[in-house]
Amino acid sequence: MFGNNKDNKKESKSNISVPQSSSHALNSVVEGTVFEGDIKSDSDIRIDGKLIGSLDCTGKVIIGPKGAIDGDIRCNNALVEGSFSGLLSVQDTLTVNQSAKITGDINTDKLVVHSGAVFNVSCSMGSAKAGKKDRPIKVPLESPAKKEELISFTDNPITSKS
């Protein structure tokens, strides 16, 4: 009914595998978990719980819709859907989804902010990260609900060639 015993023994021997580390592994702090302290990771990490402390990641940091971080983050890329308060340093691209609430200081090379996000930060981008002092400018958000909201970030003065 269930097959020959010999076949089952051969099959079970061939299914044995040794776990191997992967550079694309995903660490996770799940919803309902509160972590106080510092985290260092060479892999991507997703936070759906709460982190109070610092996070140093050579991969991508994802703060899920119910996730929250109060502290400092240093990473290669970041996607924020939940809340963040503190200093966020992103080497490449920071993406802020519409459900995000961010306050603090941001250093990034590229920035994507979706309409509806709460983005109350001081932001340095590109060459400004190296300590170059630029003037702050205000750009209106394209939000149908709150067209009067403003986003503030630091950028080089705009110059035009005639």
Image (tube, rainbow, N blue to C red):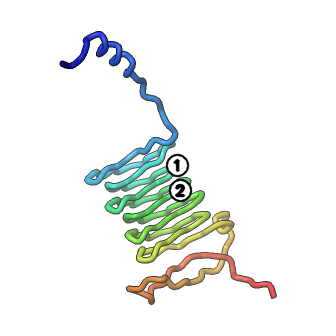
Residue 111 on image: x %, y %: 56, 68
Instruction: Tell me if residue 59 comes above or below residue 124 in the rendering.
Output: above
Residue 46 on image: x %, y %: 40, 52
Task: Work out whether residue 11 or residue 119 is closer to the camera in this orientation and state it.
Answer: 11
Pointer 1 with pointer 2, Cβ within 8 A: yes
Quarter holding the N terminus is top left
Q: Is residue 14 left or right of residue 59?
A: left
Question: Residue at (41%, 44%) from the top-left corner?
Answer: 27
Query: Which numbered marker is on residue 29?
Result: none
Mark 2 element type:
strand
Question: Residue at (47%, 45%) from the top-left corner?
Answer: 40
Q: Farthest front residue? A: 1
Question: Residue at (68%, 66%) from the top-left corner?
Answer: 127
Instruction: Tell me if residue 40 comes above or below residue 162 in the rendering.
Output: above
Q: Farthest right residue? A: 162
Instruction: Tell me if residue 104 comes above or below residue 34 in the rendering.
Output: below
Mark 1 element type:
loop
Question: Residue at (49%, 63%) from the top-left corner?
Answer: 87
Tally the numbered discs: 2
- Three-letter code, disc 2: Asn
Q: Farthest left residue? A: 1
Residue 148 on image: x %, y %: 45, 89
- Three-letter code, disc 1: Gly
Q: Which residue is mark 2?
A: 77
Q: Residues within 10 Å of mark 2 (few under 14, many from 20)?
A: many
**Mark 1–mark 2 distance (CA, rounded to whole Å):** 7 Å
Quarter holding the C terminus is bottom right
Residue 161 on image: x %, y %: 80, 84
Task: Work out whether residue 118 or residue 162 is closer to the camera in this orientation and state it.
Answer: 162
Q: Which residue is mark 1?
A: 59
Locate residue 81: give its quadrant.
Answer: bottom left
Mark closest to the chain's N terminus, 1 or 2: 1
